[in-house]
Image (cartoon, helix red, strand yellow):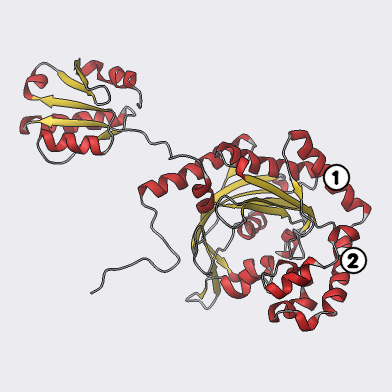
Amino acid sequence: MSQPQPVRGTHDLLPEDFARHARVQQIARDMAGRFGYFEMATPIFEFTEVFARTMGETSDVVSKEMYSFESRGGESMTLRPEYTAGICRAFISNGLQQQVPFKVFATGPMFRYERPQKGRQRQFHQIDVECIGAAEPDADVEVIALGAAILEALGVLKDCTLEINTLGDQESRQAYRAVLVDYFGDHRGSLSKDSLDRLERNPLRILDSKDPGDRVLVEKAPLYTDYLNSASKDFFAEVLAGLDLLGIGYHVNQRLVRGLDYYTHTAFEFTTTALGAQGAVIAGGRYDGLIEALGGKPTPGIGWAGGVERLAMLAEGAPETIRPIAVIPVGEAAEAAALKLAYSLRRAGHVIEMAFKGNLSKRMKRANKLNARAAILLGEDELARDVCTLRDLDKGEQTEVALTALDPALAALGRG
């Protein structure tokens, strides 16, 4: 029998990789808390309708990439491909309309069937921020500022560019939609099959096309900003003024769009070229029509999602690890006492490593392999006098310490 392998598009997070991921998630969690965002979680799978209604039947995610299955009861279920739809569903089903602005942070695995590549897997992880119930431009500024603060805390903001655009309100959107239908309708013969399907139903989706022929047409398409009404222009101006006030740099990218009908006003991405081809590490926008599309009362919202894998690759330096203290019994008679001491020190807050077997030499080799900060040696003679030998593995020095004074002695060593 051949050795078992992970499913294509998935990967094991071994301790070092997990530590990098956990660092990204913890920094994001802490920063979100400073901004007043509380952590929540949604189920890993939802009724398929939740994603189909919110992401759009014509989107690539819904039509090509979702992991959907039929339950034993005959209902269509889908592993979540993103967080926003599930959080908005939770907002409605838990009756949270009276708790706006509903400001939440979430992190966890997502699932999309797409070609695996560096930084992109079929099971991947995201950090996510949503602010539901705030229609003011200041909410857009706060959400973007939170993203910038997380990138700065990770040490990667300098490698990223904030791309931002406005999609305007529904009146502006309808005016632009009509212009796009006319423009792309005159070039039907040059459109890809997918874009032809989108032409009547959702022409803005064509602007997201990756097809080379479509991209040529997109580059010459009319600009959204030429069809914005004054209210939309004023809203965008307030967002940019807020970013200026906070000193957050940006680049207005008039080709940046969100194709689904419930997206309005601000759309943005933090992009980088540090991982090769330009790609987004955080992307989001305002979705004032999404709650209503799910069957709730009209409620504004804005949010973003960031890829943990990409951020972990981009982040500087190795994650901080706490170096352990090795407890090493010298002789069989000290085994029980060492086990008890290790348990006591762990309860006191120390990270303790205790090998299960081996002589002094083997256990010291293991301590060095684990980059232990210090070793506590316990032999029969020490136990008889209620003391231990504390060896500083960085300095190569050792001292005899009373067991009652061991806790402060370890604290004085620090983490090295």
Residue 68 or residue 155, whichever sits in front: 155
Quarter in which the N terminus is drawn: bottom left
**Do the residues under discs 2 and 1 have CB atoms within 8 angstroms?**
no
Q: Is residue 379 above or below residue 104?
A: above
Q: Residue furthest right?
A: 230
Report the side of 371 relative to 279 (left or right). left
Dot 1 lies on which element? helix
User: Residue at point 67% right, 66% down?
Assistant: 55
Amino acid carrying label 1: it is: Ala
Q: Position of residue 44 (x, y in %)?
A: 51, 60
Residue 187 shows in the view: yes
Q: Is residue 387 above or below residue 4?
A: above
Quarter in which the C terminus is drawn: top left
For disc 2, the neighbor class at 10 Å (few under 14, some 14 to 19, many from 20) is some
Amino acid carrying label 2: it is: Ala
What residue sits right under mark 1 in the picture? 237
Report the side of 149 relative to 314 (left or right). right
Q: Quadrant of residue 228?
A: bottom right
Residue 305 or residue 217, whichever sits in front: 217
Residue 376 or residue 346, whichever sits in front: 376
Dot 2 lies on which element? helix
Q: Position of residue 26 (x, y in %)?
A: 50, 41
Q: Residue furthest bottom?
A: 189
What residue sits right under mark 2 in the picture? 175
Q: Position of residue 333 (x, y in %)?
A: 6, 30
User: Residue at point 50% right, 53% down?
Assistant: 309
User: Residue at point 93% right, 52% down?
Assistant: 230
For disc 1, the neighbor class at 10 Å (few under 14, some 14 to 19, many from 20) is some
Q: Position of residue 157 (x, y in %)?
A: 61, 41
Residue 291 or residue 58, whichever sits in front: 58
Sequence-first disc among 2 and 1: 2
Report the side of 246 relative to 51 (left or right). right
